[in-house]
Amino acid sequence: MENIMLPQAHKILKVLRETQAEYTFRVAYDRPTAYNQFFQLSIPKIGEAPISISGRGVGYLEFTIRKTGRLTNGIFGLGPNDTLFMRGPYGNSFPVADFEGKDLVVICGGTGMAPLKTILNHFYDHPAIARSVHLITGFKDVNAVLFSDELAKFAQKFHTIYCLDNMEAPGFHQGFVTQYIKEIPFADFADYNVAIVGPPVMMGLAAQECLANGAQEDKIWVSFERRMSCGVGKCGHCKINGTYVCLDGPVFNYTKAKNLFD
Amino acid sequence: MTAINDVAVQQNRQQFYLFLARLYEHEVSPALLRQLRQLTYPTACGEVTLQAGYDQIHTFLTANSHVDAIDDLAVDYAKVFLAAGEPKGKAAFPYESVYTSKQKLIMQEAWEQVQAEYAAAGLALVTEQTDIKEDHIAVELKFMAHLVRTEASLAQQQIFLHRHLLNWVPQFCQDIARYSRTTFYPGVAKLTLGFLQMEAKLLVTADAPAPKPPSYALSYAAMDQIISQWQEHYHVYAPKLMASRNPDQPELVRFGEINSVKEIVTDRQSDFSAKEIYYPIMQTLFYFNQNGCQESQLTDDKDIILFLHPCDINALKRTDNIFLKNGGNEDIYYKRLRDKLKIVLLECEQSLPNCFCVSMHTNVSHNYSLAVRLGTDGVQVQVQDPSLAAAFSGMQPSQFTPKFVTANKQKAVLPEINNTAELKLAGHLDYWHKFDNNCIGCGGCNTVCPTCTCFDTTDVRYNETSPDGERRRVWSSCMLDSFTRTAGGRCVRKTPGANMRFKVLHKVYDYRQRFGGSENMCVGCGRCIARCPQDISVLDTINEFHDALEKAKSEVQ
Ligand code: SF4
Ligand code: SF4
Ligand code: FES
């Protein structure tokens, strides 16, 4: 019988430093995954944490991890050729096939961009399959900016608004992502989807703001971040009401998400 | 002849009725579709129509991607059962009345008839879905499940099956095949028809009453001898007095190995539940080094005989659901111990002060290998499991069947949550703030609860520099303030009140919703009431929650 708790060893190919606190680990992996599914990564000396795929390529996956507290620290000692233990993929992904042929709005805050990056790249690589892509993303300050190369790349093909919470900088507006949602021409869209990832408060406010600007509830998708010890519906940590985020999510349509309460 | 009295057969029948009901009740949800994909489909079940159904569903699932299937099934469901976008009449309307009334209308005689039959069984239909009437196929199937679960007489089951379901479902299934555009629902139709036909046969052959399981009367000394025989192959565990870890504290009643049934404590509820036997407080999942992980092995090859009261036998069903069913996957660490268990039902002499099993419908259980009564003049045993029968041969036969308590001193009135709006109301009651000031978040209530299953995992390194170590899992507790804390330090539930609301809703609502049955997670064993250092009673909490919710509902109107 398959042991769902047993991780597999995977080779680290590369470690990319994104910011002072965030690193991207490129790990050898060659089985199918859906866009922003997550894996339970074993963090040396500590235990496991759920991390979404932030990038995919032939023969590898990328995970962007933030150095926060004692939990994720242990992983930053690892380098190329070391092994990383992980199991997955778990959870659902944004319904990307459904996003095709329509206008797409992506709103993210901080590391929230990581899980959306594979999707953004999909539309970047195949510009013909979306009518338009609007990307609003925010970071705390210039030091917290993630994926700068890709931000520059996306700016060429997408309608982008990049912002920093409390400062202005070249290429960045000042303010929260929620302030810029009014720039999105919801009224001009025949059909569209909105994907939001970020801290819970930000997601709530961003969804509200979209609604205030004429978006429909069922066009909005959010992705939840929860503490997870198992990823397979056993440990109970991710449960909200009768819903297990690891099994039924992490992506939820807003019509469902708005009724979940912690 | 299939042993219709076999517990597993009963459960399978009930589950199958509920499974079919679910398929007709709503369109297929993403979660259900995932479950359907994870099922192992029989390849030779022995019943032609049923097998054809399995095959067809399986083929559909393998041929279609998840996203496509969800859409196609939603469209097909609406078309076949709700006649969406179809000229009048071109659909398989899932109501008995439509098939049995001259005018082909809903809510005719058959509808009135089933209503009366449900009422006679003390049931009334409660649903949010306006399209679901009493004679909807899903409701009729669920009623059969109810008859099976409550062990209604076989005659009663047979009557309902023939008078209602088999009276119209064959035609209905033909219509599904005619109007469906996918191969999925015609597959479901075959599954339904095949299963109902099999049921009809089963109920006929089962007409002859099954032999009553044998019972024996024996002395305490004889029973203890049997225990020592068992001990060659089994550990025998029962609630008994054990020294507390703190020598100043009085002894506790916990599940420990016994040599004599005299050691069993029956005049008070055990302080800890039996879960520590089959779900240890701490267990090593695997050992790791640089190159890989190696699953931990059980070193003890003895099986386990476990003496449990009915509430705790029912609690096992709850933990089974989480570890073996939730997410459509099985947890091997739970399963490997669970598979070792043989249950001895320990008859309750009386209801104890904190018990409220009757309110939770957990006062009765027939899922046991043996049942025992520890009487004043000896021990009575009923043997349901042939593998434990040998030890009793030659003992004095008796008429013993276990009795169950039918009333407790206290009652739990469960909150009635009928829709999302009421759930929201329930989750946002001011009532919950009451616990911000008195619950200290110690988690003791979770520790003693036989149905709490949550855990944490942690890695232990053998020393600072070595990559070798092991991953362990340890019971966790949703009442701890750190339960939802993520790596980044964020908690989604921040107060004792929020934790209490979470726990209580799970115990009396969320779990039941998720597993789609009538059973709640809490089994009313009362252990957490005795345990709480702050004298918080889950029973009072349930009742006060009910009252606060009713009040809030009436204020909304
Ligand atoms: S919540 Fe309390 S009464 Fe209910 S099963 Fe758990 S310990 Fe027993
Ligand atoms: S309810 Fe009582 S036992 Fe449970 S966490 Fe609160 S104080 Fe501890
Ligand atoms: S992460 Fe363990 S139940 Fe969802």
Image: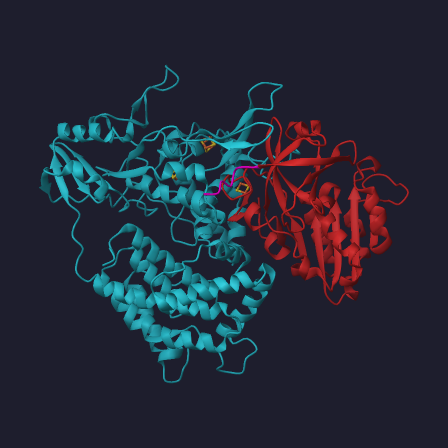
Q: Is residue B92 visible?
A: no
* Residue A59 placement (x, y as % from top left): 69, 45
Q: Is residue A117 visible?
A: yes
Left or right: residue B523 versus residue A65 is: left
Quadrant location, the C terminus of chain A: top right
Nearer to us in this view, A54 or B219:
A54
Q: Residue at x 83, y 39 (%)?
A: A166
Q: Residue at x 18, y 42 (%)?
A: B382
Q: Colour of chain B?
A: cyan
Residue B350's quadrant in the figure? top left
Q: Colour of chain A?
A: red
* Residue B224 placement (x, y as % from top left): 18, 28
Left or right: residue A205 versus residue B273 is: right
Give the overall secondary structure of the magenta segment. Answer: loop
Q: Residue at x 40, y 37 (%)?
A: B336
Q: Which residues are magenta?
A: A1-7
Quick one: which residue is furthest to the top in this view? Answer: B247
